[in-house]
Image (spheres, rainbow, N blue to C red):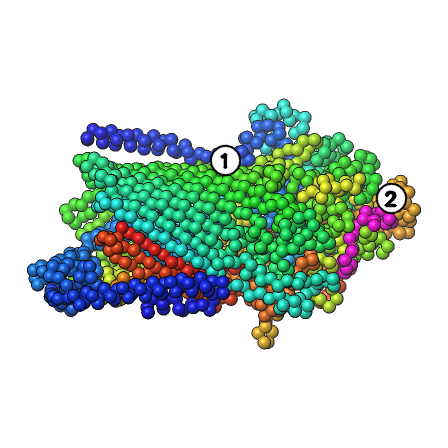
Amino acid sequence: MIMKTTIKYIWMVVIAISSFSSCVDDLNTLPLDNNQLIGEDVYQSADGYRGVLAKCYASLILTGQQGGDGGDGDVSSIDEGYSGYTRCLFYLQEASTDEICFHAGSSHGTLSMLYMNWDASTKVISYPYYRLYMAISYCNEFLRECTEDKLQSRGVYEDLKNDYVNYRAEARFLRAYCYSMICDLYGSAPYADETMEVGTIPAQKTRKEIYDYVISETESLISDLVVVGNKEYGRIDQAAAWFLLTRVYLNAQVWVGEDHYADAYRYAKMIIDSKKYPLASDYRNIFLADNSDCSEIIWGLEQDADYTQGSAGTNFLIKALVNGSMNNYFLTGVGTRGWGNARVKTQLVDKFAASDQLFDANDPWGDNKMDKRAQFFTIDHTKNTWKEGKDFQKDFANGYACIKWRNVTKDRKELVDGGTVYSSVDYPAFRTADAYLMAAEAILRGGGGTRSEALSYVNEVRNRAYLSGNYGTSSVSGAISDSDLTLDFILDERARELYTENVRRTDLIRFGKYTKGYNWDWKGSDGKAGNYVGKDVDDKYMLFPIPQDEFTTNPNLTQNSDYTN
Amino acid sequence: MPANFAFTEFDYKTVESSIITKVNLILVFMKKLLRSILLTLSLFSMLSSYAQNFTVKGRVIDEKKEAAIGANIIVVGTSIGTITDYNGNFSISVPKKNSILRISYIGYQVVEVSASSPQLASGIILKEDAQLLSDVVVIGYGKVKKSDSTGSIQSIKPDELNKGSQISAQDALVGKVAGVNVVSASGAPGSGATIRIRMGSSLSASNDPLIVIDGVPVDNSSINGSSNIIGSINPSDIESFTVLKDASSTAIYGSRASNGVIIITTKKGTSGSTKPSVNYNSNFTVSKANDYVGVLSADEYREMYTNKSAAPDGFELGTASTDWQKEIYRTAFGHEHNASITGAIKKMPYRASVGYTNQDGIIKTNSYSRFSAGLGLSPKFFNKHLSVDLNIKASKENNDKVSSSVVGDAISFDPTRPIHETYPNNVGLGYFMWMSGGVPIAIAPNNPVAELELSNNKNEVTRSIGNMALDYKVHGLEDLRFNMNLGYDVLKSTYDQNVPQYAPSMYISNQKDGTGLAYNSKQNKRNYLFDLYADYSKEFAKKHTLNAMAGYGWQHFWKKYNDETNDTEKNQLISPSHSESEYYLLSYYGRVNYAYAQKYLLTVTFRADASSRFSKENRWGYFPSAALAWRINNEDFLANVKSLSDLKLRLSYGKTGQQDITSDYPYLSTYTASYNEARYKFGDTWYTTYRPDGYDPNIKWETTSTYNVGLDWGFLNNRISGSMDFYKRNTKDLLNEIFVPAGSNFTNAINTNIGTMENKGFEFAINGIPLKTKDFEWSISANFTWNSSKITKLNTIDTDDNYVKTGNAGGTGKYLQVHKVGETPYTFFLLKQAYDDTGKPLDGQYVAADGSITTSEEDANKYVTGKSSMAPYFYGLSTRLNYKNWDLGINGHGSINNYVYNYVAASDSYDALYSSQGTSSNILHSTVKSGFTQQRLYTDYFLENASFFRIDNITLGYTFHKLWRTGSNIRLSFAVQNVYTFTGYSGIDPEIYNGIDNNVYQRPRVFMLGLNLNF
């Protein structure tokens, strides 16, 4: 009996001891799901590297790793749909201007954009901020891992030796682009690059320092980019760097008080003269589902109904701007899935001839309009974004809808019957018409070139819009004469050409018309009845404040002047 | 008739016509039953009183020869009885000379003597109930005599008689334990509950207590599709709950003990009897909605719409008159059956049980059922040196769920619209839906009746929990024993959602084109446990009692999840999603208990825990504790104070930890591969993208230090007893989700160790038997808790303006609360409503910080209200009255100064009358009162003090003893659950744990008829 028990006792001790030793190793767990990997698994193949670079690009158009509306967003504390770059930028660059008015989303601060009375706690201001820094962090990580040494040690150098220099330059370009937007939106802001370890608290750079960094970084990476015209679909080449430099130099006077119009002109002309990105033959084709082969798009952020799903990107531009029932009048390409909460303000509509403003149910594409860019839906809608005698109404029928984004093909067909759930319209981040207009503007601002050259650039864009001149046989020419060509005309022309393309606020500021001197529906208002006529606002609104949440965690920061946090 | 007063209070006023007949029937039946029972009883007693012949006299004393005052004497087999007088003397008439007298006295063993025994004259000596004195409570890795425990521990046995309707195990804890707040999530049967012991010590990490079932700590991560972590446990299998509150008692569970521990012990076989004893109980319930949200009737709506809506000409209201709330609610029925058999086969005690619960929800199509089975065997071997304790429990829960959105949809759906409507091409499947120009509107309210009747949401949870404990007393050294516990908890949960093609909801969700939905998800969990400890107990020189325990534990937690989203033709709509992860916990622990002369008690515990969730450097956490107790009543100077039966002062200090955060690999740098829907194309190739994930390489344990002072006391043989505790708790390295500096990590918010929090509280519990006579016993228990919780550090930088937003009211980032330094967690952060001279709120106007009136709803104009959803005071009351074979129990609980934001009212406005999407919606009477033209989601106008007292249940029962032999009895009972709630809150129900009233599934009122049979 005793014997038996002793054996049992020994057995127990054996179990115990054996489990003690094996169990300490148990603590070194690694992820089990095949979608969660450690770095060494990712970087063991060339596709892994490409996958991380692809994420750097994708982070400016997609919202997370799962696609669709739900799941695994990149920017964890923001409602995923709102965290998409082009969407959150839209609230800042469009909803605060003479172009767009939102009838919904007030819990995010879209009403503050309408009234121009935001502060550091306004949520929507933090969305592009965190999104841009997220993209910067991804680029930094790629640059840390994509070095010759690491490629060699991981045995993937041979596979990547022809590409990795380009890849690095592209990651640096994307990062420089993000900093240029931070410079534009927030001015002075924190700075982080690949030399800093994860977890390092970034120090703040002045707006001038960020501007200088963007210029020097972009100029120095051009030579490592793919030669203009030789890019793969989805990536960029040197023209994108030229475009970025054009835009930043053009704004240098406002951003840092430096006159760089000559540089802006020089880079814009390089794009035009390269002839690799000629204007699309028809303005309307730039915003359609098969625009992936649109010649004019220098940098397109990809959208595909099946492979890049999300509530941001062009899916947002289509659905937020149209209601489901509009699909009865024209093909939205998304069936009746529209949300319809964004409307255009009267100032934008009035930039077009009165005869071009209304929607004609018999001509849903506006073929009979002079200016093919006047794409509004007006049936059952008031032009006014207000109701007489009423406070601001969240009424989707107040204001025309913008219908320039359509998820249909050039031959005016849906991708599938009834439209797809998500959009296949690539987002044109940089396109040639903008380069033409920037070149003309730089010339008028004294950057070199001649007025006739500037006029030819503007008329190139206008003829294309009217399908006149080289672009068609329209009986009405879009061309203007030299006497019409003024800076103010360029500002209006930019609205006509680029509305809803996320440049409006920057343009208005550059022309000195954002806070004062030009007012639009509800600007500076309290939303009360009758107060829809715009008023001047404080000049501090030319910059957005650094989001308040940053001040709970980064001790190195100072808020933009005149904002408290 | 006493039977009636319990339910005349609520009467039929609130009971609607459909149920009146049913309740009436039950009442009439009960009345008849009771009347006949009473009649029979009185007949019996009359008969017996006619037969009485002999009078006997006697005296009852205790072992110290003191008189037992008020002892009960009953003539067995009759209803004749009396009690002793001041000198312990009694006189009673007996029918036969050798009738048996049963003498009972609280705290003493029951004695039966013959009426002719000579003891009667010399004094019947009662023995102290040793069982009572040595009452043991279960603690971590062992048991301790209640009198020897040094920690703040409360053990409760679920009151079998006075329980009302309990579907889930945690229902038995509601209002029963000081410092423990249990708030059920909703009125859906089988839904989970929030359990908080001492308010919880964490912010972002879990605040759920550790639940240990028969020695197996269960994983408290959420179960796919189910909100109820212990829903699989059949309440009628539970022997006791032991709640460990202070660090001295919880620290033995180390890293998971910061929020307290609840040890659930299930019923076991008894070694005594070989004859099997059988219990069968069942009940039948009728449930009914308590109240409806006050909305306009169809006619009121038409008038309001005409006057106030902004609808364009041409938009027509419907001609129907539909009360949507009445359409979704129903009178629901349920029944429950439990059977168990207990006994011993060849000295091996066993207990086997089966249970079946089937309860319909008060919202149509909602129903819950659970089948459970349990087997417990406790054989002993080697001359009782080796005890084996084997427990296996298995269960299957079936939950036909309903989308909680139907509650809100029924409130707001336009009452002028019909339920049914026909559209071409089968669109809507015969139900009304919102159309514009013949096309379904994508952003529109969902017809709640169609949702209930067409959408099929099914959750099935199959689970088995079991353990085998081997306890071996070493031969020749019996003071030493080894205990090995092997345990498992295996679970599979599936959730299926099926919505047919063309259902109205399929145009406002999913593909938004009528495509049907067949969603299926599956979760598997497998958790294993190995524990081994040695325990040594010894008494030295009669005065020193020593107990030492040391052990080792290993636990593995694994879970896997995957889902599929298809249309009804099995075409994939989006890629299946999946996840799989695991973690391990490794522990060494030990405890020493030392007692000197039964007066001075010392407990020291220590635990070292390693979690695979942290890096090698931070993996180990050390959690010590110490406690002292002084049994003052055993001191000589109190020896003569007879009325004092217990007085114990307890002091303790200890550290506990927390590691329960969502991620199993928070310290690791990982990459997430994209699903097919989130790829990016280079050239012709769609690439899977890899995203670096945010991580904190330095993440580690959150630690909580707790000081506790407690006093246990009892008077008059513990006829009145109770305890009080004061505690103070500091949590540091709070696991908290905070923003990270932009550009420093791959996320903008991370779980990291930051912040400190201070909790303190006072708990008071009292149990007493104010009245006890021959036929009558009245017992009462009450507990009261005061808690205070304050954040003392929160962010890297704390300034006056810094806070972390929380309390999302749903949808997109509508935060109503903040965590802020110096404030209670979950403090409401709102706009200060401006009022006109008459006290009417000014629509959309608020008082800014500088006192001016503003219309801006930005955070800058909000203020920290100082009011939190966390209740600072809560209390529970229960009482029971026994009269002969009758029993009446009442339970209630309440809280004081908990705040609730009436989001149901806040999200409503005149604006809702018409949406420019082309839909109309109903509004609330409260909106007519406020006159708000737009949603005012952040105004303190809707913040209400939600103090309440709820009468949880009233139960009336009658027991028939000795049905066909001794020990066989049957009890019939009638109970009402959720009887009445006293509150000033304007919404349906003030008891909402997170303080945001957002269309919750209301708790029904339940009428229950029960039967309990033992033989």
Q: Which residue is mark 1?
A: A31
Label 1 Cα neighbours within 10 Å, binned few <14 / some 14-19 / many ≥20: some
> What span is colored magenta in the figure?
A362-385
Residue B180 pos. (x, y %): 38, 56
Q: CA distance from mark 2 to mark 1?
A: 58 Å
Residue type of the residue flagged with mark 2? Leu
Residue B712 pos. (x, y %): 27, 58
Q: B247 or A13: nearer the eye?
A: A13
Which of the numbered marks, if any, corresponds to residue A467? 2
Identify the residue at horizontal 40%, vertical 48% (top origin): B356
Residue B25 pos. (x, y %): 42, 63
SS label for mark 2: loop
- Residue A238 seen by the camera: yes
Q: Earlier in the sequence, mark 2 or mark 1?
A: 1
Residues behind callouts 2 and 1 on a single chain? yes
Residue B879 pos. (x, y %): 32, 63
User: Residue B380: within the magenta?
Assistant: no
Q: B227 or B506: nearer the eye?
A: B506
- Residue B881 seen by the camera: no
A16 to the left or right of A31: left
Q: Indicate whether B984 appears above or below B463.
A: below
Identify the residue at horizontal 61%, vertical 55% (top origin): B447
